[in-house]
Image: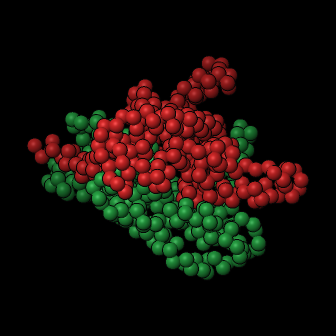
């Protein structure tokens, strides 16, 4: 009897913690999203579904923009990370872990700080643009900060390791005999890549896409630090609703809508793949 | 393949660029609040690292929170990881899905929902609520790390220990735990790194308490002082050092 209870007892403390600080807050936020009122006057539960429709009407474009930025950053991460991850997995030999560490360097600097550091680098008269303007290569009015490019590049930079790691893990596990077999069967390099390497690395690509797309779409730090008024993302709106307007019902409805969109996508993805696979790749 | 090698180095250079700038501007002899233009080399900011009491306070808060949440997370996460890796039980699939949801949920939503709860229940926000939040979002990472280690272990070793008269507790302490120790250690390091770096969830659960990332965030509007660069540099150096020790240690064990 004790033997059968053991796993439940082991899961219990962590499970209760997740119940109290993950599940219950979500339920309370769902409840908030149907209320009216504000922090000063108090809140009333009136099952106001219009919080959702109004949120979508007012900020639909911000949702679309956030998902678009998230998608751009995810694709950029994939294109940038895949070749490097492949080279490290197949060709780096004994120095694999050194290269991997170099690829993960950004993780050793606080997320906010490395974004601020990009602001240094890209500042209108900073070390890059200032120098180029001094040489007369760029016109005086040229700027990068405050553009869509700056925000998407910031997102790409910040979440690239999340994409690189699962791809590397998938490629590293690939049996080298598969490549030999392909060569023995007269596959060209391109054919070997397209029909052997790429399909076998897809679980890593999918996991990396989730780990990049979700935090990138819900981000507000990059848009705040690197972007301008044209780059406001839904995360910035939610932040403002909470901390400036104290409009918890609207903020909750917007948060819930965002999560519903992102989680629905993620779970469809995970179902197609099996959770174990995604988790396995996500853990590294 | 040469081209790929060059490409990998270019990518690494891009990844390292803002870090190099952060480190360099910690040595910048600037007088203004805006630390944007290179004015010459100085070690002044290293000597006056703790001159800003509120910044020092923020760093101390970050360290206290990271230590506390790492301790709790490691215990809770290890237990879950062992249960999932070593036992078959009903509800295991559901547990895996919950862990996946905790890893895949956007931080913004987790932070916002925690704020909703703390406001509803009138819980004062501070170090306690930050630690609760950090444990919540990092426990799943520790659990999957430990699970991955526990799955590959031979159950015969534990059975042998039990056959030789070891009690359940002795089997756990003398056989199971030592075997999964690398996974537990990796999980603990991950939990510490996640906690000390966290911005979004902390932003929502901190109330008036300030951590290092929050201080940096609020300084972006007025200008980030060079001490922030120095602290960032030191955290970076310590983190890289620990990682190198880990990599070298792993290589030693293999050979």
Q: Is residue B148 visible?
A: no
The residue located at (54%, 26%) in the rendering is A199
User: Where is A196 relative to B4, above or below?
Assistant: above
Outermost residue toward the front?
A41
The shade of chain A is: red
Q: Position of residue B119 (x, y in %)?
A: 33, 55
Outermost residue toward the left?
A1
The residue located at (15%, 55%) in the rendering is B167
The residue located at (42%, 49%) in the rendering is A247
Query: In the displayed structure, does residue A207 sit left or right of residue A42?
Result: right
User: Where is A61 relative to A243, above or below?
Assistant: above
Query: In the displayed structure, does residue B100 sit left or right of residue A220?
Result: left
The residue located at (73%, 49%) in the rendering is A144
- Camera-side residue: A67 or B136? A67
Q: Which chain is green?
A: B
Query: In the displayed structure, does residue B208 sit left or right of residue A199?
Result: left
Q: Position of residue B94 (x, y in %)?
A: 28, 36
User: Where is A125 relative to B106, above or below?
Assistant: below
User: Where is B225 relative to A258, above or below?
Assistant: below
* Picture quadrant of residue A168: top right
């Amino acid at each position: 009897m004790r033997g059968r209870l053991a796993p439940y007892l082991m899961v219990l403390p962590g499970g209760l913690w997740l119940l109290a600080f993950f599940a219950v807050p979500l339920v309370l936020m769902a409840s908030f999203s149907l209320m009216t009122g504000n922090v000063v006057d108090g809140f009333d539960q009136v099952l106001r579904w219009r919080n959702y429709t109004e949120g979508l009407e007012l900020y639909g474009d911000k949702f679309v923009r956030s998902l678009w930025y998230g998608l751009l950053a995810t694709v950029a991460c994939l294109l940038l990370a895949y070749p490097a991850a492949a080279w490290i997995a197949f060709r780096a030999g004994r120095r694999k872990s050194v290269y991997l560490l170099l690829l993960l360097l950004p993780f050793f600097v606080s997320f906010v700080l490395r974004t601020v550091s990009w602001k240094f680098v890209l500042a209108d008269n900073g070390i890059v643009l200032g120098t180029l303007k001094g040489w007369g290569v760029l016109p005086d009015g040229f700027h990068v900060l405050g553009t869509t490019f700056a925000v998407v590049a910031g997102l790409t930079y910040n979440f690239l390791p999340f994409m690189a790691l699962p791809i590397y893990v998938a490629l590293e596990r690939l049996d080298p005999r598969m490549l030999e077999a392909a060569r023995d069967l007269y596959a060209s390099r391109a054919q070997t890549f397209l029909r052997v390497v790429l399909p076998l690395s897809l679980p890593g690509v999918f996991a990396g896409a989730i780990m990049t797309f979700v935090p990138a779409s819900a981000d507000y730090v990059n848009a705040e630090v690197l972007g301008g008024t044209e780059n406001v993302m839904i995360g910035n709106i939610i932040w403002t609703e909470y901390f400036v307007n104290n409009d918890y019902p609207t903020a909750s409805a917007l948060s819930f809508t965002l999560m519903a969109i992102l989680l629905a996508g993620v779970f469809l993805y995970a179902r197609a793949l099996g959770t174990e696979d995604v988790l396995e790749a996500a853990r590294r | 393949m040469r081209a790929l090698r060059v490409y990998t180095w270019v990518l690494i250079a891009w990844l390292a660029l803002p870090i190099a700038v952060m480190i360099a501007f910690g040595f910048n002899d600037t007088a203004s609040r805006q630390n944007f233009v290179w004015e010459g080399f100085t070690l002044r900011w290293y000597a006056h690292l703790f001159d800003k009491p509120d910044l020092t306070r923020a760093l101390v808060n970050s360290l206290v929170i990271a230590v506390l949440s790492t301790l709790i997370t490691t215990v809770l996460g290890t237990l879950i990881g062992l249960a999932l890796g070593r036992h078959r039980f009903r509800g295991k699939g559901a547990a895996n899905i919950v862990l996946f949801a905790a890893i895949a949920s956007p931080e913004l939503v987790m932070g916002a929902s925690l704020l909703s709860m703390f406001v509803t229940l009138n819980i004062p926000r501070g170090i306690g609520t930050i630690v609760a939040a950090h444990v919540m979002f990092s426990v799943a990472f520790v659990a999957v790390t430990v699970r991955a280690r526990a799955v590959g272990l031979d159950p015969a070793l534990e059975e042998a220990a039990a056959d030789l008269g070891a009690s359940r507790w002795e089997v756990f302490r003398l056989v199971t735990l030592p075997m999964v120790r690398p996974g537990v250690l990796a999980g603990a390091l991950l939990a510490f790194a996640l906690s000390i770096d966290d911005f979004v969830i902390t932003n929502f659960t901190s109330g008036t308490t300030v951590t290092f990332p929050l201080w940096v965030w609020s300084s972006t509007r007025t200008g980030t002082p060079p001490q922030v660069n120095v602290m960032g540099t030191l955290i970076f150096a310590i983190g890289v050092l620990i990682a190198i020790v880990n990599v070298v240690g792993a290589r030693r064990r293999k050979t």
